[in-house]
C-alpha cells in the first residue's frame, strides 16, 4: 500500500471530522454589530410580548403586566400606564406614593390626554409630583391613541435630567406607537369576528338550505323525545358550521375533507336513523393528499338526497379513497334509486348554479379547472341499480397548494 | 357604528362594531365579495412580505434554513470523517483494531455492528437539534 | 451442485407461500381492516413505526438479505461498507431530504423536479433517469431469484428469473397498491425473522460468532474441518496456498500448475499441489479433512480492509471510497423510497420515520456479517466450487439435525422471496407509475379516463416486468451487490445533487439542475455499462485505474454533477424562479405555525 495516498486520505478524513465538529459547536462571535442587533432583537421581543396583554384591552391587570415588561427591558427609574381617568399601573422607584388607582393626575398627564401629543418633563416641577422625596426627576409622557382617540398614556421616568436622553425619548415614543397599533388590532379582531359571523350567514347560501332546515327540525324533534341526543346534535352542528366557515383556502388534505364529510354524515344519520348506512374504505396512504375543498361532501350529499332519500328501505353509501400510485381514486357510491343515462348527462352538463357550489356539475367544473379537462367527475348509474360517482386526482399537481394538516 | 360606553374606571376595551346580519341574497353576495377581498388582501400581503425578503419573518426563515443546513453538513461531515478514517486506522493503529471484544476484533466489530447504533445516535441528535431550531423559529414569530 | 440434488419441497413451499401470505395480507387489510363504518378507524393515518417498517421492508432487497452475507464470505472486510452505506444513506436522507421534501408535497422525484422549477420538460428528463435506476435495481433482484430457484429446484437460472419475475409482475399488475404499507411491513418482519433465526439457530448448534471468526481469520490457510465433496465444473480454476489431499469420486482431468495434464480415474486419491490448477473434465472431488480449501482468500487479508475485493483492480483506496460514497448518497434517489415518505403526515413525521428506519436497518445488518463468517467456517466448499453466492441457502445444510436444516432452509427461502418481492414490487410500481403517469398520461394521452389509466398502469407494469426479466437473465455473472452498487451510483450521481441543491440552495436554476442531472446520470451510467460489458471478465486479473474508475464512478461523477449544477446556475442567474422564496417557505417552514402557505399559481 503506498503511503502517500493513504496519508492524504487520512488527512481529508480528519479534516472532515474536524469540520463537522466545528460546524456543530460553533457559536457566532459577539461583534459590536452583533451586540446592537441583539439589543434590537430584545426590544422587538418586548414589543411582541406586550402584545398579548393589550389585545384584551387596557385594564389594571393588563397594564400591570405591561409596565413590568417595559421596566425589565428599558431599565428606567419607573414606568407608569395611565387610563382615561386614573393611573392603571406603576412600577419602579417612587411606587410608595405613585399608586395605581389614584384618581388625581398630574398636570402633564392631563395635558397629554387632552392634546394627544407627547410631552417631555425635564425636571421635578414639570413632572408635577408633590411628594418631597420623590426620586423621579425627569419623565417622558406619550399618548396611546386608537383610531384617533387618546385612550391613555405611557410615562417613563428617570432619576435625573441627564438620564433622559433623546434616544430614550424616541424609544418611549416608538413603544407607545407600537402599543397603540396593538390596541387597534384588537378592535380589528372584533371586526373580523363580526365579519365571520356574517360569513356564516353567507355560507347558508352555500350549504344547502334543505340541509339546515332538516337538521334543525330533527334537533327540534329530539329536544322533546331525547334531549341529550338533541344537545349532542347541536354541538355537532355548531362544530360543522365552524369548520365550514373556517375553511378559507381552496385546498385541504383528504383527511380534513373526510372529517367534514363525517360531521355532515353524523347529522344526516340523526335524521335518517337506521335507513342510512355509511361505509368507508380509505387507504391511509392517501390521507395526506391535497384535494380541493368541498368536493367530497357534495357528492355524499347528492348520494343521500337523490339516491337514498327517494328509496324505500335502507340505503348504503360507500366512500372509497384508493391509492393508485401517482394518483388517488375517490368514489362515492350509493344503492339508491339510480339515474337514467339522460339524467346523468343532465346532471353533469347543467349550468352550475350561481351561488351554491354544490351541484355535481359545479364540482366537475372545479376539478376540470384545476387538474385539466380529463379530470372531471365520472358518473355511472342505472335506474334501480344505484349510482357511483368517481374522480381521479394526482397526488402532486403543479399549482396545487400543499395542505397543512 | 355604536361605540362602547367609556367606563369611569379608566379601562379601555376594544369597541364592538355592530353589523346587521343580512337576510337578502344581494346583501349576502356583497358580504361574500367583501370577504373575498379581505382574504385576498391578506394573502397578497403575505406573498409581498416574503417576496421582499426584508421583513422579520423572511430573515428568520433564511436563518433557520442556514442553521439546519449547517447542522446537516456538520453531522454528515462527522459521519464521513469517521467512516473514512476507519480503513486507515488499521494501518496507523493496528493494535487498537485488533482489540478483542466478545471474541471479535474491534476493527471488524465497528463496521459490522457498532457503527449502526452510532449512525442511529447521529440521526437522533440531528432530529433533536433541528426540532429545537424550529421551535425557536416558531417562538420568535408568535 | 452442493446441496443434495432434487427439489427442496418444504423450502419451495415457504418460498411461494410467503408470496401468497403477502398477497393475503394485502387483501385482508383492504377488505377487512380498511372497510369500516367507523370513521375514526378509517381516518387514522399511517404511524411512523408502521411506515418505517414498510420502508425498511421495501428497502432490504436481495442484496441485503443474501448478497451481503455471500460477499462477506467471499471477500471479507471490504464488503462491510455496503451495509454501512445503505444504513448511512438513510442518515443522509434525514439530514438533507426527508422533512423538506415531504413539506413540498412532491410524491416522486419527477414531481419535485417539475414543482421546484416549474418545468414539465425537466420532469420528463428526470423520469428517464428514474426508469434507468429503477430497472437497474431490479436486475440484482432477478439475479437473486434465479439463483435461489436454482438451488431449490435445480432448474436453470433463467427459469427462476422468469418464474419469480412473472409472479411478482402479475401481482403488481393485478393488485397494485392493495394494502401496500402493511404488506411491506409484513415482509420486513419476515426477512428479519428469517435472518435472526438463521444466525441464532446456527450459532446455537455450531458455536459463537467470535470462535468462528478467530478460526478463519488467522495466518494459517483455510482448511476443511471435515471431509467434503465438491462437484467441479469443467474450466474451474483451483488456487491453493498449500497442497490439498483429495480423492476423485468421478473420473476427472486436471491440469496441474506447470502445465501437466493428468487423467484421474474414479476412486483415486491424489494431491493437488499449491498454485493454480485447472479442471479440464469435471466431476466430484472429495477433499479430506484438514486439506486446504481452494480459492479461499487468506484469513488475514479477508479480515482486514483493502482486501481482495477492493485490491483486485489495483487501486483499493479509490475503489473503497467511491463505493462508500455511492451507497451513502444513492439512497436518497431511489425511486421507491421517496414515495413512501409521502405517506407521512408532515415533515416532523417524516423525520421520525427516518430515524426508526435507521434503527430497523441497523438491527437487520448485524446479521449478514455474522452469517458470512459462519459460512467461511462451516461451508468452505463454496469457495472451491465458486458458489459463495448460494451461502444463505447452503448454511442450513451445515448444521446438525436434519429437521433443523430443513426448517432453516425453508425459513431462509421465505425470507429470500420476501426480499425479491418487496423491492421488486416497489420498484415496479415506481417504474410503472412513471411510465403510466408521466409518459402515457401526461405526454401521450392526457384525455384518458380512469379506466384507461388503470389499464395503462397494468400494461406498464407488465412492460417493466418483461424488461426486468429479459435483462435479469443477462446478468447472471455479476454479483448481486455489484449490480446494486451500480444502481446506487447512478442514483447518487443524478438525483442526490438535484435534491440537496434544490432544497437548500435558492440559486439553483433550471438549466443548472438539468445540466447537472443529465451529466451526472449519463456519465455514471455510461461508465457502469462499459465496466459491465467491456471490463476484463475476471476483474482480479489486471491493475487499472481506468477500470477502477469505471466500476466505481461515484467518486468522480458526483463532484462533476455538483460542479455542473453550481456553475451553470451561476451563469444563468437570471433564471432563478420568481417565486423561489415561496418555494423555500413551503419546504422549510415548520409545522404548527399557523402560517398559511397556500397559494395558487395562475
Image (tube, rainbow, N blue to C red):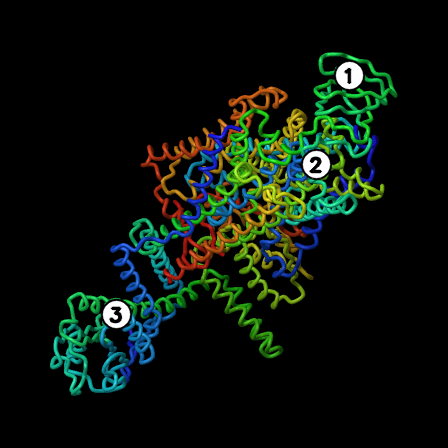
Q: Residues within 10 Å of mark 3 (few under 14, many from 20)?
A: some
* Residue C254 numbered mark, or none: 1
Left or right, residue C463 beside residue A180? right
Q: Residue furthest top?
A: C260
As drawn, the label of residue A74 is: 3
Furthest toward the front, the residue is: B95
Give SS at disc 3: helix
N-term mark: 2 or 1: 2
Task: Classify residue A404 as left or right of residue A189.
Answer: right
- Residue annotated with mark 2: C216
Say if labels 1 and 3 share a chain.
no
Q: CA distance from mark 2 to mark 1?
A: 28 Å
Give the CA separation, mark 1 to mark 3.
Answer: 97 Å
Side (left or right) of C1 relative to A308 = right
Chain containing mark 1: C
Residue A119, given in percent of the width and then of the height, sits at 14, 73
Q: Is residue C478 visible?
A: yes
> Which label sits on residue B138?
none
Q: Nearer the viewer, mark 2 or mark 1?
A: 2
Estimate the x, y position of residue B121 in percent, counting from the top left: 54, 52
Of the 4 image quadrants, the one containing the N terminus of chain C is top right
Q: Whole-Å distance between the Cαs marked 3 and 2?
A: 75 Å
Q: Quadrant of residue C530?
A: top right
Q: Closer to the camera: disc 3 or disc 2? A: 2
Amino acid at each position: 500500500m503506498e503511503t502517500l495516498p493513504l496519508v492524504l486520505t487520512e488527512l481529508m478524513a480528519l479534516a472532515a471530522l474536524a469540520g463537522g465538529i466545528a460546524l456543530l459547536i460553533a457559536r457566532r462571535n459577539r461583534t459590536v454589530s452583533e451586540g446592537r442587533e441583539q439589543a434590537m432583537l430584545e426590544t422587538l421581543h418586548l414589543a411582541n410580548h406586550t402584545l398579548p396583554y393589550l389585545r384584551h384591552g387596557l385594564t389594571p391587570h393588563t397594564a400591570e403586566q405591561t409596565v413590568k415588561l417595559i421596566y425589565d427591558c428599558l431599565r428606567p427609574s419607573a414606568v407608569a400606564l395611565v387610563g382615561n381617568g386614573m393611573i392603571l399601573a406603576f412600577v419602579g422607584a417612587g411606587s410608595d406614593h405613585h399608586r395605581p388607582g389614584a384618581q388625581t393626575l398630574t398636570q402633564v398627564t392631563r395635558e397629554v390626554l387632552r392634546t394627544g401629543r407627547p410631552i417631555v418633563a425635564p425636571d421635578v416641577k414639570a413632572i408635577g409630583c408633590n411628594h418631597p422625596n420623590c426620586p423621579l426627576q425627569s419623565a417622558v409622557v406619550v399618548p396611546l391613541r386608537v383610531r384617533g382617540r387618546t385612550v391613555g398614556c405611557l410615562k417613563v421616568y428617570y432619576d435625573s435630567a441627564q438620564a433622559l436622553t433623546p434616544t430614550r425619548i424616541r424609544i418611549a415614543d416608538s413603544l407607545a406607537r407600537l402599543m397603540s397599533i396593538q390596541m387597534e388590532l384588537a378592535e380589528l379582531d372584533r371586526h373580523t369576528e363580526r365579519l365571520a359571523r356574517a360569513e356564516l350567514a353567507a355560507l347558508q347560501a352555500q350549504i344547502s338550505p334543505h340541509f339546515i332546515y332538516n337538521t334543525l327540525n330533527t334537533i327540534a324533534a329530539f329536544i322533546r323525545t331525547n334531549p341529550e341526543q338533541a344537545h349532542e346534535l347541536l354541538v355537532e352542528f355548531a362544530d360543522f358550521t365552524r369548520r365550514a366557515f373556517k375553511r378559507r383556502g381552496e385546498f385541504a388534505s383528504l383527511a380534513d375533507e373526510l372529517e367534514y364529510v363525517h360531521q355532515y354524515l353524523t347529522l344526516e344519520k340523526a335524521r335518517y336513523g337506521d335507513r342510512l348506512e355509511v361505509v368507508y374504505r380509505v387507504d391511509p396512504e392517501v390521507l395526506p393528499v391535497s384535494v380541493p375543498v368541498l368536493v367530497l361532501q357534495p357528492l355524499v350529499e347528492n348520494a343521500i338526497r337523490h339516491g337514498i332519500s327517494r328509496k324505500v328501505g335502507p340505503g348504503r353509501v360507500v366512500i372509497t379513497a384508493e391509492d393508485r400510485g401517482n394518483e388517488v381514486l375517490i368514489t362515492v357510491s350509493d344503492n339508491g334509486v339510480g339515474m337514467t343515462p339522460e339524467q346523468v348527462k343532465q346532471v353533469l352538463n347543467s349550468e352550475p348554479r350561481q351561488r351554491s357550489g354544490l351541484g355535481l356539475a359545479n364540482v366537475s367544473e372545479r376539478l376540470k379547472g384545476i387538474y385539466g379537462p380529463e379530470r372531471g367527475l365520472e358518473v355511472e348509474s342505472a335506474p334501480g341499480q344505484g349510482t357511483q360517482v368517481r374522480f381521479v386526482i394526482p397526488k402532486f399537481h403543479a399549482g396545487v397548494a400543499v395542505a397543512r394538516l | 357604528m355604536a361605540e362602547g360606553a367609556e367606563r369611569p374606571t379608566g379601562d379601555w376595551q376594544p369597541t364592538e362594531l355592530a353589523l346587521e346580519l343580512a337576510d337578502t341574497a344581494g346583501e349576502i353576495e356583497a358580504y361574500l365579495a367583501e370577504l373575498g377581498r379581505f382574504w385576498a388582501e391578506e394573502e397578497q400581503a403575505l406573498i409581498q412580505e416574503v417576496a421582499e425578503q426584508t421583513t422579520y419573518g423572511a430573515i428568520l426563515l433564511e436563518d433557520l434554513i442556514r442553521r439546519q443546513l449547517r447542522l446537516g453538513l456538520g453531522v454528515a461531515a462527522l459521519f464521513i470523517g469517521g467512516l473514512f478514517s476507519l480503513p486507515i486506522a488499521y494501518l496507523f493503529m493496528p493494535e487498537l483494531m485488533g482489540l478483542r471484544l466478545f471474541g471479535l476484533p474491534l476493527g471488524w466489530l465497528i463496521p459490522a455492528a457498532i457503527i449502526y447504533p452510532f449512525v442511529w445516535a447521529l440521526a437522533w441528535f440531528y432530529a433533536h437539534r433541528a426540532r429545537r431550531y424550529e421551535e425557536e423559529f416558531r417562538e420568535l414569530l408568535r | 451442485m452442493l446441496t443434495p440434488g432434487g427439489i427442496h419441497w418444504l423450502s419451495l413451499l415457504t418460498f411461494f407461500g410467503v408470496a401468497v401470505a403477502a398477497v393475503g395480507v394485502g387483501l385482508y387489510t383492504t377488505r377487512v381492516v380498511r372497510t369500516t363504518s367507523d370513521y375514526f378507524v378509517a381516518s387514522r393515518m399511517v404511524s411512523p413505526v408502521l411506515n418505517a417498517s414498510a420502508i425498511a421492508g421495501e428497502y432490504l432487497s436481495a442484496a441485503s438479505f443474501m448478497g451481503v452475507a455471500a460477499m462477506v464470505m467471499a471477500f471479507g472486510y471490504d464488503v462491510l461498507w455496503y451495509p454501512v452505506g445503505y444504513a448511512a444513506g438513510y442518515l443522509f436522507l434525514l439530514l438533507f431530504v426527508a422533512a423538506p421534501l415531504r413539506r413540498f408535497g412532491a410524491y416522486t422525484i419527477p414531481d419535485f423536479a417539475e414543482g421546484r422549477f416549474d418545468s414539465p420538460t425537466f420532469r420528463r428528463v428526470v423520469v428517464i433517469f428514474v426508469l434507468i435506476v429503477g430497472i437497474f435495481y431490479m436486475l440484482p433482484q432477478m439475479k437473486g431469484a434465479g439463483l435461489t430457484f436454482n438451488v431449490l429446484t435445480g432448474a436453470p437460472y433463467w427459469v427462476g428469473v422468469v418464474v419469480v419475475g412473472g409472479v411478482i409482475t402479475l401481482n403488481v399488475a393485478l393488485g397494485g397498491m392493495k394494502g401496500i404499507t402493511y404488506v411491506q411491513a409484513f415482509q420486513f418482519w419476515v426477512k428479519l425473522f428469517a435472518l435472526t433465526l438463521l444466525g441464532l439457530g446456527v450459532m446455537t448448534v455450531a458455536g459463537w460468532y467470535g470462535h468462528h471468526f478467530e478460526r478463519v481469520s488467522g495466518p494459517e490457510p483455510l482448511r476443511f474441518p471435515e471431509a467434503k465433496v465438491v462437484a467441479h465444473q469443467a474450466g474451474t480454476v483451483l488456487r491453493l496456498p498449500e497442497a490439498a489431499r483429495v480423492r476423485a469420486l468421478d473420473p476427472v482431468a486436471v491440469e496441474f500448475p506447470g502445465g501437466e495434464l493428468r487423467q484421474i480415474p474414479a476412486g483415486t486419491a491424489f494431491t493437488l499441489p499449491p498454485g493454480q490448477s485447472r479442471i479440464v473434465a469435471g466431476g466430484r472431488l472429495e477433499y479430506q479433512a484438514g486439506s486446504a480449501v481452494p480459492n479461499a482468500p487468506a484469513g488475514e487479508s479477508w479480515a482486514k480492509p483493502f482486501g481482495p475485493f477492493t485490491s483486485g483492480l489495483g487501486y483499493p483506496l479509490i475503489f473503497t471510497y467511491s463505493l462508500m460514497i455511492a451507497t451513502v448518497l444513492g439512497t436518497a434517489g431511489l425511486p421507491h423510497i421517496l414515495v413512501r415518505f409521502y405517506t407521512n403526515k408532515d415533515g416532523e413525521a417524516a423525520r421520525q420515520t427516518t430515524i426508526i428506519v435507521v434503527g430497523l436497518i441497523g438491527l437487520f445488518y448485524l446479521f449478514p456479517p455474522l452469517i458470512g463468517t459462519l459460512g467461511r467456517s462451516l461451508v468452505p466448499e463454496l469457495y472451491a466450487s465458486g458458489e459463495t453466492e448460494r451461502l444463505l441457502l447452503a448454511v442450513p445444510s451445515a448444521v446438525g439435525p436434519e429437521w433443523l436444516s430443513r426448517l432453516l432452509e425453508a425459513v431462509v427461502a421465505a425470507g429470500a422471496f420476501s426480499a425479491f418481492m418487496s423491492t421488486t414490487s416497489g420498484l415496479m410500481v415506481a417504474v410503472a407509475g412513471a411510465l403510466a403517469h408521466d409518459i402515457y398520461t401526461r405526454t401521450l394521452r392526457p384525455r384518458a379516463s380512469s379506466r384507461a389509466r388503470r389499464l395503462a398502469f397494468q400494461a406498464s407494469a407488465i412492460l417493466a416486468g418483461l424488461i426486468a426479466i429479459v435483462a435479469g437473465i443477462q446478468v447472471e455473472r455479476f454479483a448481486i451487490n455489484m449490480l446494486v452498487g451500480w444502481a446506487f451510483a447512478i442514483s447518487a450521481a443524478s438525483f442526490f445533487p438535484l435534491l440537496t441543491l434544490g432544497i437548500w440552495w435558492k440559486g439553483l436554476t433550471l438549466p443548472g439542475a438539468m445540466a447537472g442531472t443529465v451529466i451526472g446520470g449519463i456519465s455514471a451510467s455510461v461508465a457502469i455499462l462499459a465496466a459491465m460489458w467491456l471490463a476484463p471478465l475476471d476483474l482480479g486479473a489486471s491493475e487499472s485505474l481506468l477500470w477502477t474508475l469505471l466500476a466505481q464512478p461515484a467518486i468522480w461523477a458526483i463532484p462533476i454533477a455538483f460542479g455542473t449544477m453550481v456553475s451553470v446556475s451561476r451563469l444563468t442567474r437570471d433564471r432563478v424562479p420568481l417565486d423561489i422564496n415561496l418555494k423555500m417557505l413551503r419546504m422549510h417552514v415548520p409545522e404548527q405555525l399557523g402560517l398559511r402557505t397556500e397559494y395558487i399559481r395562475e
